[in-house]
Image: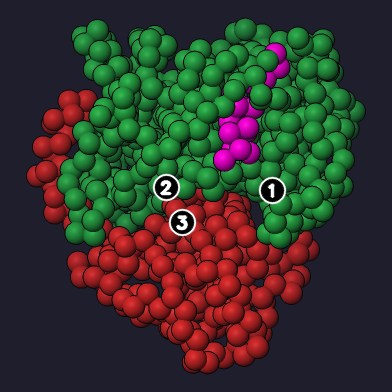
Chain colours: A green, B red
Amino acid sequence: MGKSLFQKVWDSHSVGTLADGRTQLFIGTHLIHEVTSPQAFGMLRDLGLKVKYPSRTFATVDHIVPTINQDAPQDPLAAEMMQALQKNCDDFGVTYFDLRSGKQGIVHVVGPEQGITQPGTTIACGDSHTATHGAFGAIAFGIGTTQVRDVLATQTMALEPLKVRRIEVTGDLRPGVYAKDVILHIIRLLGAKGGIGYAYEYAGDLFDRMSMEERMTVCNMSIEGGARCGYVNPDAKTIAYLSGRPYVDMSDFDATALRWLSFASDADAHYDDIVRINASDIEPTVTWGISPDHGVAISENIPDPAHASSEIDKQSIEEALAYMKLPAGTPIKGVKIDVAFLGSCTNGRLSDFREAAKYLKGHHVAAGVQAIAVPGSQIVAIQCEKEGLDQVFRDAGFEWRAAGCSMCLAMNPDKLVGDQLCASSSNRNFKGRQGSSTGRTVLMSPVMVVAAAVKGYVADAREVFGMD
Amino acid sequence: MSLEKVIKVSGRGVFVPGADIDTDRIIPARFMKCVTFDGLGEFAFYDVRFDPSGNRTNHPLNDARFQGASILLAGMNFGCGSSREHAPQSLRKYGFNAVIAESFAEIFNGNCTTLAMPCVVASADDVAILRAAIEADPQIEITIDLEKLLVTTSAGHEIPVTMPDSARDSLTAGRWDPIQELLDNNAKIEERAKALGYVA
Ligand code: SF4
C-alpha cells in the first residue's frame, strides 16, 4: 500500500518518538508574527536558549498593523509589539519582512509569495491559518506560543500523528461559485468539528484545475472544519508558481521540482476516510450564524430551530440567531449589511481583487455601507495598483488600505462598531471576532462581498452582476 | 528541568454555559496586545462577563458563590477557534487548574496540557450532573484523578472521564512541558536537518 503526502512528509521529518508517545517532528520552516512570538522569545531568554536555525525562521508583522498610516500605530501597545518583534529578530538573527521591506503582509500571503512555502516540507506558525501553506503540498500547522518556543529553540515540536481524510471534489463549478464557496460548503457538510484528529487532503479534478491562490483559499479554512492541517498534492502548477521566487533555489531546479513532486500521494495511498462531493452541487455559500459551519446556499433560508434535527442543534441555532438578530426561516438574501470587508489571508490575494474588481467596475457601494479593501501584502497592493484595481475600488466607494489582517480580527483599528453586520471575505464568524462584542459577520467569497456592498444587503452576485 | 507531576487536581467548580466556546470568547483578541502573558487573567471571558458599557453581567464567573472556583466545567467543543495560547494562559492566570468538558478542540487541549492544566472529557449527562451539583452547593470539592481517570466530589459523585493518553502520561509523569526532551535530542535533530537537504 502506498503513502499519502501527509505520511511521506511526516515520516521524512520525524526525529523520533518521545517518552509520552508523541512524535518529535522536525519543522522545516517557522513563520512568526508579532502577536504570538514575543512571549516565546521571552521564554527563550529565560531559559538562556538560542534560535536553533535562524535561517529557517521568517518574521513579518500583520495582525496589529494599522491599514492607514501603517508604520505609525496610534495604539502604544501595538507600537510596543512591533518594536519587540524588531528587537527579537535582531537579537536572534531572524529574517524580518518589516514595513520598509516592501514584502510585509499577512504571514500566510508572504510565505508563498516569497517562495518560502515549498512542497514536501513542514511549516509551523503561531497562527491557526497556517494550513494555508498546505496548498503547496506542505504539512503546515498552527501552533501555540509554547510550541513557538519549542520550534525556535529546537526546530522541532511534539505532535500526535493525524488521520488523513481525502476530500474529493469532481466536476466543474457553476458560474459565480468560487474556491471560498467550496470550502464553506465542505465545512457546512462535515461540520466545524468534523475534521478533529484529521489532516484534510483536497483532491479530485476540481482542485487540479484550481490556481495556487484558489487552493490557498481552500486550505486556509481547514481549521474552521476542525482539521489540524489541509493540503493539495503538488503538481505542475505548484512548480510553475514557485519557479523564480526569491527563496527558491534555482540552481538545480529540475531536480528540486522532481523531489517536490515525489511527495504527492501515491495512487494506492491509505486514507482513513474518503468524502466525495460534486462540484456542481455547490452554490455561492454564506454563513448565517456564529460558527463557520453555519452555512447556507445564497438561495436558501436561514434555518429554523423548529426544524432542528436534535435538541442540541435547536439550542445552537437559537443561540446563533439571537446573536445575529436574524429571523428564523427567512431568506439569507436581503439581510442588510453595514460593512463590507474584502481582504484577509483567505481572500486577500491578487486574484481575489482582480475577480472582485471585474464585477465591481461601474457599480457603486450602497449608501450607508462602509466598504474596505485590504490587500494581503505590500506586494499584492503594488500589483493591484499597477493594474489600476485600487482605482476601481476607490471609484466604487471602497476605501483602499495598506496590507494587514485588518478587520479579520480585532487587534488593529479596523473594527465593527456595535452590532454592525459585515459581509466579509475572511474566515471566522465567531461572536465578537471583528472587534465589537455584538458585531456580526457573514462570511462569503470576494465577489459576493462586492455584490453585498453594491446592494447594501446580502445578495446573489450572479443576479447582481448578471453572471452566467 | 524537573516538572511537577500532575496526578490529582482538586478545587471548587464553576460551569460556563454554551457549546463551541471559542478562544475569542475566552480571551477577546483586543486583549492579546501584550508582549507577556502576565495580566491576561483579568480579561478571561471579558465580553461575556461585562456588557458593552462595562457593567458586570450575571455570568457565572461574576457570581459571588463561585468566586475562587478553580475547575472549569463546560459543554461541547470547548476552546475551538484560534490556536492562540492566550486563551489557556488567561484561564490559568484567572485561577483555573483544570477543565472538565463534553469535548475539547484539539489545539486548545494540547496548549492546556503544556501549561499543566488537564482537560478531561465527561459525558453530557455527567457534566449536567456535576453542574447541577455545584449549582446546588458551590462549596462542593471536585477532584480529578488523572491516574484513575475519575472525577469524584465531596458530595459522593464518581464520574469516569477520558483524556488523550499522551496528555495523561505527560501530566502524570511530570513531562507536560516537552522542551527538555526536545533539546536532549539535539544530535538527532541535526541529523534529520542534514538528511532533509533543504534546511542547512
Ligand atoms: S488575516 Fe485573519 S485569519 Fe489570517 S492571519 Fe490575519 S488575523 Fe489570522
Three-letter amino acid code at disc 3?
Phe
| Residue at which label 3 appears | B108
Q: From the image, which quarter does the N terminus of chain A lie in?
A: top left
- Which is more toward the observer, A208 or A221? A208
Disc 1 marks a residue whose amino acid type is: Ile
- Quarter in which the C terminus of chain A is drawn: top right
The reply to whether callout 3 and callout 2 are in contact (CB within 8 Å) is: no
Secondary element at tag 2: loop
Q: Is residue A69 left or right of residue A306?
A: left
Q: Position of residue A166 (x, y in %)?
A: 44, 31
Residue A181 painted magenta: yes
Q: Residue at x 24, y 48 (%)?
A: A23
Viewer-side residue, A467 vs A3 = A3
Q: CA distance from mark 2 to mark 1?
A: 22 Å
Q: Which residues are magenta?
A: A175-190
Q: Establish if A46 lies above or below A125.
A: below
Residue A158 % position (x, y): 28, 50
Identify residue for label 2: A197
Q: Is mark 3 within 8 Å of ligand 1?
A: no
